Image (cartoon, helix red, strand yellow):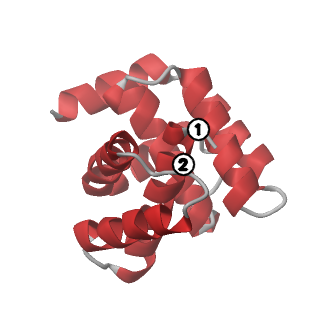
Amino acid sequence: MKSRTRARAVALQVLYEIDLTGHHPGDVLQQRVEDARAEGQNKFSPESEEFARLLVFGVSPLASRIDEVIAEYASDWPFDKIAAIDRNILRIAVWEFAISAQTPVQVAINEAVELAKSYGSDTAPRFVNGVLGSLADHQHILAKIFKEMG
């Protein structure tokens, strides 16, 4: 697994846990990074840790606002029916392409679909792809919304 892909997986695990439990993001991130390093199959580099940290502390404070935007611009999918794991996959992808703007839209979507394949239900990859495809159609509007938020 590529280092950024692994970092996204760790960030997803952290965001999922804090979403469900309210645990402190820093504590959860530290534990997940330690777990990733202990697995040994893929070395979890300092760069991977930094990228995971960037995702967690980028997404976490904006989660409710990202949720509002997803609900508004992907209205074919009732937001309150989205599984917690899928919700966090969507948050990461939206943050990457609409807020940080460091990841090309198609890369963010592809990475999100891969996370959905690994962590979601059988229908999650198609669902994530569909929602993000709808959001990608509004990429510039989303970027403007988040930029205006400061």
Comparing 136 with 7, the one in front is: 7
What is the three-letter code of the residue carrying label 2? Arg
Residue 106: numbered disc: none
* Residue 80 in view: no
Classify the position of the C terminus by image quarter. Answer: top left
Q: Relative to 11, say whether 121 is above or below.
A: below
Q: Could you say which quadrant of the image residue 148 lies in?
A: top left
- Give the residue at mark 2: 6
Q: Relative to 49, say whether 149 is above or below.
A: above
Q: Position of residue 28 (x, y in %)?
A: 33, 72
Q: Residues within 10 Å of mark 2 (few under 14, many from 20)?
A: many
Comparing 4 with 137, the one in front is: 4
* Residue 93 in view: yes
Q: Cα distance, mark 2 to mark 1? A: 6 Å
Looking at the rendered structure, the secondary structure element under dot 2 is helix
- Give the residue at mark 1: 2
What is the three-letter code of the residue carrying label 1? Lys
Q: Is residue 8 left or right of residue 121?
A: left
